[in-house]
Image: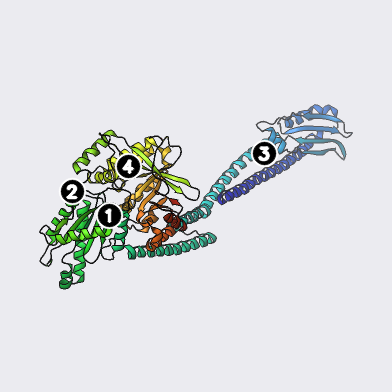
Amino acid sequence: MSLTKQLSSGFFIILLLVFLVSLIFNVVSTRQFIETQLQSHAQDTATSLGLSITPYIGDNTNLPIIETMTNAIFDRGYYNSILLKNAQHNVLIEKKSDQKYIDVPQWFIKTFSIRAPSASTEINGGWVIEGYLVVESNPSYGYLQLWLSAKQSAAIILAAFLFSLLFVWLLIKKIVQAPLNSVVAQANDISHQKFQMIEKVPSTRELSQIVIALNAMSKSLSTMFNRILSQSEEYRKFAYVDSLTAQGNRRAFTINMNNVLRGRHVGTTNYLVIARASSLNSINKNSGMNAGDIYLLSMVALLRSSAVTYLETPPIFRLNGADIAMIAENCDSETAQNIAKQFIRETKRKEKSEHESGFAHLGVTSFVTGDSLHTILEKADSALAKALQNDKSWQLADDLNVFHSNTDWKEILTQIVERQHATFVKQPIVDKTNSEPVYFEWFARFHHDNHESAPMDQLIPASVRLDFSQVLDKLIVANMLIQIAPQSTEKVGLNLSRLSLLDNDFSEWLLTKLHHHREVCTRLVIEIPERALVQDAKYLENVVSRLKALGVEIAVEHFGAQLASFSHLQKLKPKYLKIDGKFTRDIDQHQDNQLFVSSLTSIAESLSIDIIAEMVESEAELSWLSSCGIKYFQGYHISRPMPLISN
C-alpha cells in the first residue's frame, strides 16, 4: 500500500473514532440530562400533588375528589404511575400507563436505555402522617427527545467529519503525494537519462531536503553525462569529421568505400565523384586563408545541392586541401552525368576573376563491388586530370551498361504499384546469450508484369529519384500487415525510408493504419535510417513518440554512417541501435573502429538502448563484438535471409 493511502487510511480511522466517540459522548450526556430532568419533574409533581390532596386525606369519603385531582395530572401522559397509600401502606389509588415509544427505533432504546425515575412524598394531617404518594415519570418523551438530539448531533458531527476528511485528503495530496510523485517522476527520468529539475520545492522540511538533494544529483549527473557525450562527439569529429567543412574526412571516406566495395550487392553500379577547388591555392595566396575557406565551403554546398536533386543525401568527404569526394551508391550513368552537369553549371555562375584556374573541376568514375579502392582512385584522378584540360570542366572516366534507364524504372515502379503486391524474406536478429531471435527484419521483394524480380538495390534509389518512395513504403506496410498475421508471435522489423518518415501525409497514414491494427503494434519494430536523425530530428521525435504510444518499438539503423550526434539518441530513445556495417566489417583488425564501437556501446547502455551489430560476416568479428558487450547480431554469419512460411 502506498504511503499516501496509509496516511489517508490512518487519518480516516482516527477521524472516524473521533466521530463515534463524540456522538456517543453527546448522546450519553443528553441521556443523563434527560434522566435528571425526569427525576426533578417527578419530585415536583409528587410535592405539588401531595400538597393539593392533604386537606382530603384521611377521610375515605374524599377519595373521589383525590382521584379526580390525580387523574387530572396523570392523564397528561408524562407519568408511568402514580400510587397513593395510607399510613398503613394500603393502596388507596393506583394509576398506571402502557409505555409506548413513538418514532424511536428499538435498537436505540436498547442501546441508550433511560431509567424511569420515581419520587415520593409524605402526606401529613397535622402532626400525623396520613399517607404516602409515589410518582414515577414516563421516559417515552425522554426517548423521543434523546433520539431527535442524537440525529441532530450525528448530522453536525458527520458534516464536520466529512469536511475534516476532505481537508486531510487535500492536505496529504498537496504536502505528501504531489512532492513524492514529483520525486518518483524525477528518479524515473534520471534512470532514463532525462535530467529534469523539480521547480516547485515542497514546504515541508523533510521532503524539501529530498527534493533539493535530488535536484543537485540530477544537475550533477546531467553535467557528467553531457561531458561524456561531448567527449564522444569530439572524438568522432576528431576521428572522422573534417573540421572546416563538417563533412567526413579521409579516414571516414576510406571506411565508407571499403564498406561499399565489400557489400553483398554484386553487380550494382556505384559512382565516385571527386571535385577540386581549382583556384584554392591562388585565393589563399592572394586573399588569405579565410577567403579560401569560404570558397571551399561554397563548393561543398554546390556539390551537395546538385546531388540531392537526384539522390538521397549521398555522403561527402574532404580528401585533402582542395579535393572533395562524394560516393553515389546504386547510381546509374545518366544520374551521375546529370549531377556533374548541374554542378558545373552552378560553378560557372560563381566564377569570378579571382578564380584564376576556374571555380571547380570534376572527375567521375563508376565502380562495383569487389573493385580495388586504389584502382578506383586512380580512375577518378585520371578523369579529374582530363577535366582540368577540357572545356566542359568535368570528365566521366568510363561508361558502363546499367540495368535500366529512368524511363524503364518509372514503368516498372508503376507496374509494381498497380499490382499492390509484395513478398518478403526475413533475416533474424539473434541474441547470442540464448541463440533466440529478438526479431526478424523483413525485406520486401517485387515483381513486375514480366514476372521479373526487380533488384532492390536499384529499385529503392530509383523510387527516390522518381518520387515513388512514399507510395512504395505504403505498399510495403500494407502487405506486411496482411502477411504478419500467420507468423506466430514473432516480432517483425520493417525499414521505412527517411523521405517517408519525414512526410506528414505518410506519417499520418501510417499512424492511422497501425491504430486500426493495434494487435500488430506490439510485434512491430520500425527501423529508421540514421540520416533521418540528421535531417529533421525534432519532427521525427514527434512521429516516434506517437508510434511508441501504440506499442511499436523503434530501431535506428546504419548508425555511424552519417555521423549523427549522440544527443539525438538521448531525445529519440530508440529500443535498438544498429551499428553501421562499415564499423563492424573486420573490426577485429581496426583499432579506430573498436574505439568507436566501445564508446557507442557504453553510451547506449547508459541510455538503456540495446545495440545490434549488423552485417556480421565472420567469427572473428562476432567474437570481438561479443567481448565488447554486444549481444544482438545480424548478418550472413548468423543467418542468411529466408522466405516467410506464408510466402
Mark identifier at residue 371: 1
Of discs 4 and 2, which sits in the foreground?
2
| Mark 3 Cα shell of 10 Å, populated few (<14), some (14-19), many (≥20) | many
The one of 514 and 249 positioned closer to us in this rendering: 249
Query: What's the colour scheme?
Result: rainbow
- Indicate which disc, 1 or 3, sits on the residue closer to the N terminus: 3
Instruction: Label 4: state its secondary structure.
Output: helix
- Indicate which disc, 1 or 4, sits on the residue closer to the N terminus: 1
In the image, residue 37 sits, relative to residue 363, either above or below, namely: above
Find disc 2 in the rendering and name its residue: 334
| Mark 2 Cα shell of 10 Å, populated few (<14), some (14-19), many (≥20) | few
Q: CA distance from mark 4 to mark 2?
A: 35 Å
| Residue type beneath disc 1 | Asp
Of discs 4 and 3, which sits in the foreground?
4
Find disc 3 in the rendering and name its residue: 146
Q: Residue at x 73, y 32 (%)?
A: 73
Q: CA distance from mark 2 to mark 3?
A: 105 Å
Q: Does residue 56 show up?
A: no
Of discs 1 and 4, which sits in the foreground?
1
Q: CA distance from mark 4 to mark 3?
A: 71 Å
Q: Which quadrant of the structure image shows residue 604?
A: bottom left
Find disc 4 in the rendering and name its residue: 508
The one of 143 and 553 positioned closer to us in this rendering: 553
Q: CA distance from mark 1 to mark 2?
A: 21 Å
| Mark 1 Cα shell of 10 Å, populated few (<14), some (14-19), many (≥20) | few
Mark identifier at residue 14: none
- Indicate which disc, 1 or 2, sits on the residue closer to the N terminus: 2
Tell me: 192 left or right of 313: right
| Residue type beneath disc 4 | Glu
Tell me: 644 left or right of 48: left
